């Protein structure tokens, strides 16, 4: 089924991805021949117990880490052969990021942080799109604040806006709500879901929180470096059941 | 605790290396100063011992009452008859009289050999070879036996391709003469006595050449067997009388050794002064490094507190770390210092000062002082950061917010900084303009405190100045430039203390440049104003002036009109060793424009009195007509009347007439000979005529006004280059400091840089960001340094205004170059940190702990 899907609908894919850390007895297969597609216009959550390889999957998909073997594609571009400079430019143009913490440059204000990838590229933002994103994250009146003057939730929303402002192929988020209370977490994930639904963006998050995962259209369950299950249109309850079933 | 400290030190090798390097350089400087001077001193002592001869006692003229420190040209003498008296004394086996004087060799190309460094000496040849330190080896000829023969030292012979049988011109205070080389002499196994050139003549010939007919410079005496040198000396002393002194060879050697040590002591002090600058700058770097380390390890230190360490123990942890770094740095520093001393010795040899062969002398004192300097400076520098570490609350281990120690308010800093600055200024101005006995100390300590004050205040200026310096960066380099600027502004204290180290180095270089430019401008002004003569003749030999035969020949030229010489000598005035200027009162006004009181020259000619500088008259409360006491090297002198005043800006402090000089001094040479062309003679024609005479005197140079100014300036430039070169070390240390701070800041900003890389910053942009951050810090330091240096230069030049430093000049182009160099230094300082930052593993940087 994967092979027949038109590739233009796929924002990112991994083929036979293997990632081995360490050597000899200490060898760990963080990814073990994994293959997966991430469809354009979808909000995907990757779940799995600690050590299941979910963060490694996200990092290799995002071009932050390289595979021991296998191949990753962002859109039509294979990452394996890219040099550091090209990979960096690809991240800048085609990939957005939201990390669990420390997403913002402390010396830049919210607006400058949002525009950071464009500034680095020396590119001009699309003003309409910028306004739309800022409006959606509800930060219009906070744009000239420094990160230290923003709440944790606001900081993460700035990060999300930054991830979207360059209209990337795909946005990766690593436990984006991990440090937030439930209200702030809900606001952030809600924005992410709206970005997918209303603005046709593609987001992949890694989380261990069933509530966070329930905002996604699709959940991929990982264990021992490979996909063990998938779920479409999840709810927190169904996710919990599935997790119990998987023994996670 | 100790184990933790050791681990802490070695956990980050780069940090250790850079911090230790600051100590290494300072300690190396200290150690090399000592090793170098000790080594030379020891080697000369050894040389004096090996060249020890059969002489037991020297009989010589009583020493001048005044120490002749300015020029070693005052050779006294004793009458030849003294030799008979000495020979008659009981216990004397052999006694021989000899003369010493000035003699400079001329090479085959007609150029004078040496003269700008080691002395150029002439001696009478000793026929009693058992009492002579020089000897001629088989095959190298023989000693001079008749007039017209000379023996020269082996080093001069080898270097100038001179051999037995060659004819050589020798310059003395009289007219140049030609001699036949009959022998090549050595000192035991050594070819040279510290690079001095030697010309030895038969006794009568030597007496004629040195203008010592019927005189001896000294008599060497050997004792009968069984008579000790002391007994012999006592015997001779009782039988002779007059102005003579009898000393044992041992005493004489000790005196020479002491004289060498004294000369080296000056060198040692000068080198140690530069070492002090290096250490002071190093202290800033070390302090800054430990402050950053403490800030970065807040969590770790809090953990120590949380598991039960007391605040005192945490303080000790940091101090112990400092001690370990200081120990490593000091040990390496002493080693490097020894190497440096070897390099210095090689350099001296290359410059013609042949050092005697021998081992390096590393005295325990050198090691102790070097270690003490390294350890104390490191510990003291780490003291404040260490105390700060003790204030880290245990809860900071768990809580990021608690880890932030409250910042002291800027007002407090401003007040403290101003107080320190004011104290430094007061001390500085007391030293410069006050009348304390310890001027130099006040100036030194004052500048030091002043520097500290500036560095305390610097953080207040860091953000605004960085904003101005960095203004073009965002426009030129976009976000990388913007972040470079931001990064220097976010931790003004760190930026300021990093820049402060550079500030000190730059300030001193600027100060030296301003001082030099002011001297040059003052000299150019005073030469133009006061020396209107068409030509000036000077000796190229440091030790001797222009001989009277040259002056006579020039004076006889029909193309030359007015001519007057100017002599220099050292005498003791009112018990103080001081320089005197001697002029011919009847002709001096025709070639100079020195400002003197009305009728001063006439009075000088008529009375053999003295002219005194106006400022000195005021200081001493003298008035014209007063008598002051004076002692000349060759005459006990007595009271001398002040018959007029001179403007000290143009002259020395004291002026006497040539007639008076001739009584008090034996050196008949002129320091300057000023001459004007005769009326109606073209400059070129007069120049050609005077050059015609000078051609026969290879150690005399004739210059017109602009040449004189240019050469004086070139000499000053040489001095400046030397000082600047030594101060560059301080700048190198400061640059290391920038590297260190940046490397530490980057560790602190790992996540930030990781984030920038993740969202698309290419390595080149990261490097650019760090590089420009370094450039801003360097420029900030340079700008502060230029400001402080200009101020210090201005203050010192103003303070010396009445000592001939009339004009204050700013060497603008030099300063601009210096600031640009500082920017380049910033780029160099950033090479390692920027490379490190750009190679940072993005994944590790962003991974959440």
Image (cartoon, helix red, strand yellow):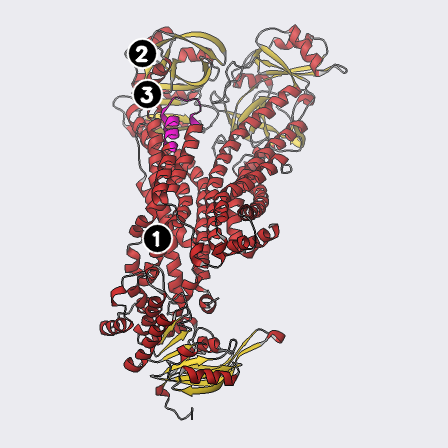
Q: Earlier in the sequence, mark 2 or mark 3?
A: 3
Secondary structure beneath dot 2 equals helix
Q: Which residue is mark 3?
A: B558
Q: Nearer the viewer, residue B544 or B413?
A: B413
Whether residue B619 is visible to the viewer of this picture, yes or no, is yes
Left or right: residue B114 versus residue B532 is right
User: Could you tell me which residue is drawn at 53 percent across and 47 percent down?
Assistant: B311
Going by the picture, which residue comes out furthest to the right? B226
| Chain letter for mark 2 | B
- Label 3 crowd bin: few (<14), some (14–19), many (20+), radius 10 Å: few
Give how far apart the Cα atoms at labels 1 and 2 are.
65 Å
| Chain letter for mark 3 | B
Q: Which residue is mark 2?
A: B600
Give how far apart the Cα atoms at labels 2 and 3 are.
30 Å
User: Could you tell me which residue is drawn at 61 percent across and 50 percent down?
Assistant: B2
Looking at the rendering, the stretch of residues picked out in magenta corresponds to B423-440
């Amino acid at each position: 089924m994967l092979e027949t899907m038109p590739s233009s609908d796929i924002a990112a894919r991994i083929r036979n991805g293997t990632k081995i850390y360490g050597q000899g007895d200490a060898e760990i297969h963080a990814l073990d021949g994994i293959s997966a597609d991430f469809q354009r216009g979808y909000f995907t959550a990757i779940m799995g117990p600690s050590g299941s390889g979910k963060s490694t999957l996200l990092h290799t998909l995002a071009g932050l880490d390289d595979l021991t073997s296998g191949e990753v594609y962002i859109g039509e571009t294979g990452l394996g052969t890219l040099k550091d400079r090209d990979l960096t430019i690809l991240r800048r143009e085609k990939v957005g990021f939201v990390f669990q913490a420390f997403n913002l440059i402390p010396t830049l204000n919210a607006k400058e942080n949002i525009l950071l990838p464009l500034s680095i590229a020396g590119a001009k933002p699309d003003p309409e799109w910028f306004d739309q994103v800022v409006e959606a994250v509800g930060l219009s009146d906070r744009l000239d604040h420094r990160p230290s003057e923003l709440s944790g939730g606001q900081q993460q929303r700035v990060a999300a806006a930054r991830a979207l402002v360059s209209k990337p192929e795909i946005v990766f988020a690593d436990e984006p709500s991990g440090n937030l209370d439930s209200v702030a977490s809900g606001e952030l994930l809600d924005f992410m879901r709206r970005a997918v639904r209303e603005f046709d963006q593609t987001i992949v998050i890694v989380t261990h929180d069933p509530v966070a995962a329930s905002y996604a259209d699709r959940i991929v369950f990982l264990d021992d470096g490979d996909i063990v299950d998938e779920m479409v249109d999840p709810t927190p309850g169904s996710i919990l059941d599935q997790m119990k079933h998987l023994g996670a | 605790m100790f184990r933790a400290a050791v681990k802490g030190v070695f956990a980050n090798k780069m940090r250790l290396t850079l911090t230790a390097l600051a100590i290494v350089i300072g300690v190396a400087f200290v150690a090399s100063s000592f090793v170098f001077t000790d080594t030379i001193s020891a080697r000369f002592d050894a040389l004096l011992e090996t060249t020890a001869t059969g002489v037991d006692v020297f009989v010589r003229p009583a020493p001048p009452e005044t120490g002749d420190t300015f020029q070693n040209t005052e050779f006294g003498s004793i009458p030849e008859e003294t030799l008979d008296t000495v020979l008659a004394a009981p216990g004397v086996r052999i006694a021989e009289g000899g003369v010493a004087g000035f003699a400079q060799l001329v090479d085959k190309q007609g150029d004078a050999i040496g003269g700008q460094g080691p002395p150029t000496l002439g001696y009478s040849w000793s026929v009693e070879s058992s009492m002579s330190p020089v000897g001629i080896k088989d095959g190298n000829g023989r000693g001079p036996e008749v007039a017209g023969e000379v023996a020269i030292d082996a080093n001069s012979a080898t270097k100038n391709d001179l051999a037995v049988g060659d004819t050589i011109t020798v310059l003395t205070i009289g007219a140049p003469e030609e001699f036949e080389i009959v022998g090549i002499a050595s000192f035991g196994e050594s070819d040279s006595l510290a690079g001095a050139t030697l010309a030895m003549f038969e006794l009568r010939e030597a007496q004629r050449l040195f203008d010592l007919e019927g005189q001896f410079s000294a008599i060497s005496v050997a004792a009968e067997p069984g008579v000790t040198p002391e007994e012999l000396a006592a015997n001779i002393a009782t039988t002779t009388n007059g102005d003579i002194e009898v000393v044992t060879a041992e005493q004489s050697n000790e005196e020479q050794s002491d004289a060498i040590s004294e000369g080296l002591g000056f060198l040692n002090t000068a080198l140690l002064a530069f070492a002090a600058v290096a250490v002071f700058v190093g202290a800033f770097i070390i302090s800054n490094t430990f402050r950053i380390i403490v800030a970065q390890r807040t969590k770790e230190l809090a953990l120590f507190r949380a598991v039960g360490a007391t605040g005192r123990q945490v303080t000790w942890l940091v101090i112990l770390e400092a001690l370990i770094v200081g120990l490593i740095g000091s040990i390496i520093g002493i080693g490097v210092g020894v190497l440096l001393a070897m390099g210095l010795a090689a350099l001296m040899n290359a410059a013609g000062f042949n050092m005697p062969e021998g081992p390096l002398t590393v005295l325990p004192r050198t090691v102790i002082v070097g270690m003490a300097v390294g350890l104390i400076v490191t510990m003291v520098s780490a003291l404040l950061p260490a105390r700060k570490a003790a204030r880290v609350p245990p809860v900071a281990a768990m809580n990021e917010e608690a880890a932030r120690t409250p910042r002291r308010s800027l007002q407090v800093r401003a007040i403290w900084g101003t107080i320190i600055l004011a104290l430094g200024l007061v001390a500085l101005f007391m030293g410069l303009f006050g009348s304390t006995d310890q001027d130099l100390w006040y100036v030194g300590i004052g500048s030091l405190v002043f520097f500290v004050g500036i560095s305390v205040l610097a953080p207040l200026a860091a953000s605004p100045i960085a904003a101005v310096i960095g203004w073009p960066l965002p426009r030129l380099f976009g976000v990388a430039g913007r972040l470079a600027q931001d990064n220097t502004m976010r931790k003004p204290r760190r930026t300021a203390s990093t820049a402060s180290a550079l500030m000190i180095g730059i300030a001193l270089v600027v100060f030296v440049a301003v001082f030099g430019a002011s001297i040059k401008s003052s000299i150019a002004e005073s030469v133009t104003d006061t020396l209107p003569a068409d030509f000036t003749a000077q000796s190229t030999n440091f030790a001797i002036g222009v001989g009277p035969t040259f002056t006579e020949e020039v004076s006889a030229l029909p193309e030359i009109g007015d001519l007057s010489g100017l002599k220099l000598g050292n005498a003791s005035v009112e018990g103080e060793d001081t320089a005197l200027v001697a002029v011919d009162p009847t002709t001096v006004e025709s070639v100079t424009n020195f400002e003197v009181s009305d009728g001063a020259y006439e009075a000088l000619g008529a009375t053999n009195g003295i002219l005194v500088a106006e400022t000195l008259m005021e200081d001493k409360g003298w008035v014209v007509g007063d008598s002051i006491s004076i002692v000349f090297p060759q005459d006990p002198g007595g009271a001398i009347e002040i018959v007029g005043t001179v403007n000290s800006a143009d002259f020395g402090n004291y002026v006497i007439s040539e007639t008076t000089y001739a009584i008090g001094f034996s050196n008949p040479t002129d320091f300057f000979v000023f001459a004007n062309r005769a009326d109606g003679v073209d400059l070129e024609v007069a120049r050609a005529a005077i050059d015609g005479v000078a051609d026969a005197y290879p150690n005399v140079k004739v210059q017109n006004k602009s040449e004189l100014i240019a050469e004086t300036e070139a000499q000053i430039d040489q001095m400046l280059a030397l000082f600047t070169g030594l101060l560059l070390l301080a700048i190198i240390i400061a640059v290391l400091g920038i590297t260190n701070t940046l490397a530490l800041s980057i560790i602190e900003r790992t996540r930030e840089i990781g984030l920038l890389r993740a969202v698309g910053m290419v390595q080149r942009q990261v490097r650019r960001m760090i590089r420009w951050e370094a450039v801003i810090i360097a420029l900030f330091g340079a700008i502060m340094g230029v400001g402080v240096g200009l101020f210090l230069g201005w203050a010192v030049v103003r303070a010396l205004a009445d000592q001939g430093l009339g004009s204050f000049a700013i060497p603008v182009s030099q300063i601009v170059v210096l600031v640009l160099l500082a920017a380049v230094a910033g780029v160099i300082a950033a090479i390692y940190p920027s490379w490190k930052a750009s190679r940072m593993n993005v994944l590790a940087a962003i991974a959440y702990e």
